[in-house]
Image (tube, rainbow, N blue to C red):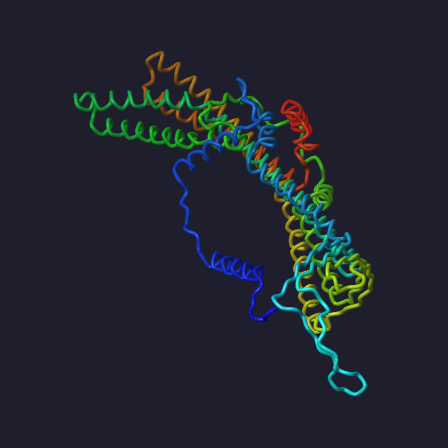
Amino acid sequence: MNNKTRHPLVNTLALASLALLLQACTTPPVQPLGADEHKQQLQADQAALRQGVPAIGNTLGLDEAIARALKFNLDRRARQMEEALALRQYDEVGYDRLPRLMAAAGYTTRDSDRIARSTDSITGQPSLANPSIAQDRTHLLTSLTLSWSLLDYGLASYNVEQAGSRLQAAAERRRKATHLLVQEVRVAYWRAASAQKLRGEVRATLGLADEALADSRKAEEERLRSPLDTLRYQRQLTENIRLLESIEQELATARFELAVLVNAPVVQNIALVADELPGAKDPLAVPAAAMEEQALAQNADLREHLQLRRIAAIEARKVVARAYPNLTFSVGQLHDTDNYLVNSSWGEAGVTLSMNLLNLLALPAQKRSAEAAIAVADQRRLAAHAALVAQVHIAREQLAGSRRQFDRADQLWQLDDRILQQTLKREEARAGSKLDRVAAQTTAIISQLRRFQALAQWHAAVSRLQGTLGVDPLPESADDLSLEQLRAQVRQRLLEL
């Protein structure tokens, strides 16, 4: 065959390669997100938000609010997905320890014969025989090879250990997020409960104050009272109106915050059960030393730091292992369609010992880096340890202080409520003014608001102490329980803690 004659398949492959190269160099145009596509995605997201979330009944108690947050809160679902991803990665890494079973097929073609000359091994002179052909122009080589690397197996085992530690760290982060979520729900619940309780009273008092202010301005125009007394009267009314409007503004967003936490529609008006008081059981009856011991054993943040330290220590062992020689075992079966071969199918086995000598040069620097990472992990763990011990005592003081603040706020509210009742009686007897009534109602509303705020702070302090001690809101996973079962367990947990 003429050497200038090209094989048709070679031409085809060359053209295909050129086409792929040109395609790779071409930048596709930017496709903007269309309005219809955006709308469809929003509708799908809106449906996904409420998927599997039962509607709230006539009332919502604190136990059900916590249960709904634990089961349906979107941020907590994201944490659960992170943990599930870590579990899948742990399962995936385990397969790296298996041997490699490689199936390969190689097709080779050329446009001219492979013609070879030979040289006499004794005389060194070219052989007088004609050049010979020892290979087909086109042939297919297939193989099935099983190989196992001792070094890869060791490194994969370390990777499995690290993946297990990352899985445990993800679980601890989920525990920490759960503690924070319960704390947020308890605070938001009582803020929303105060808004529900006081909204009607605030609006009624605002209406009364506006009416009294209008009467005062009319009296000012008719000059029924001295100008100075009238202005002072109007100033006190306006100040009470300002206080009431600030309270109304403060309470306006409370129900929306609670709805987001429990994954309920923000437009839904939820009737809350607002008759729960701080429990009679005193969490501070446990000695501080016992709390320190429990926190050091169960706190999620400290346990996560322990897992991160394990990961750093395993990484240091991996650095040293990479410098070891690699022993590889292989066995395989091959087949070649080349007609010039006498044995077109054959099996082969081998043992290979290899080592990258340049790894020895980088080993000291890599070891120092790994040891520094361990030192950093140790220092962070020690800092978390010291902060945790301090946090135990801080949480105890915050809980004790919040209980005192609630008791004092409750006393003030009862006093202001009694003053309001006396003021109403005086007004009925025509011995008091609308200003006195507005002022007394405003003071009583503020006192009741402060009482609810103190109650919310007490609940926050309890949750903060529980999170510091590593006391989980639930003894079991929320995913395995129905909403009613979860609510019952949360209720029991609230009574125990």
Residue 59 place in picture, x, y as percent: 54, 19
Residue farthest along the top direction in this orientation: 429
**43 vs 478, nearest the viewer:** 43
**157 vs 385, nearest the viewer:** 157
Left or right: residue 289 compared with residue 234: right
Residue farthest along the left direction in this orientation: 222
Q: Name the residue at 33% across, 15% down.
A: 431
Q: Name the residue at 56% across, 70% down.
A: 4
Q: Is residue 249 above or below residue 9?
A: above
Displayed quadrant of residue 180:
top right
Q: Name the residue at 58% across, 31% down.
A: 72
Displayed quadrant of residue 224:
top left
Residue 23 place in picture, x, y as percent: 48, 56
Identify the image quadrant of the C terminus: top right
Residue 480 place in picture, x, y as percent: 68, 30
**359 vs 130, nearest the viewer:** 130
Residue 280 visible in the picture: no
Residue 331 place in picture, x, y as percent: 81, 58
Q: Is residue 429 above or below residue 85?
A: above
**288 vs 177, nearest the viewer:** 177
Left or right: residue 102 compared with residue 31: right
Residue 17 visible in the picture: yes
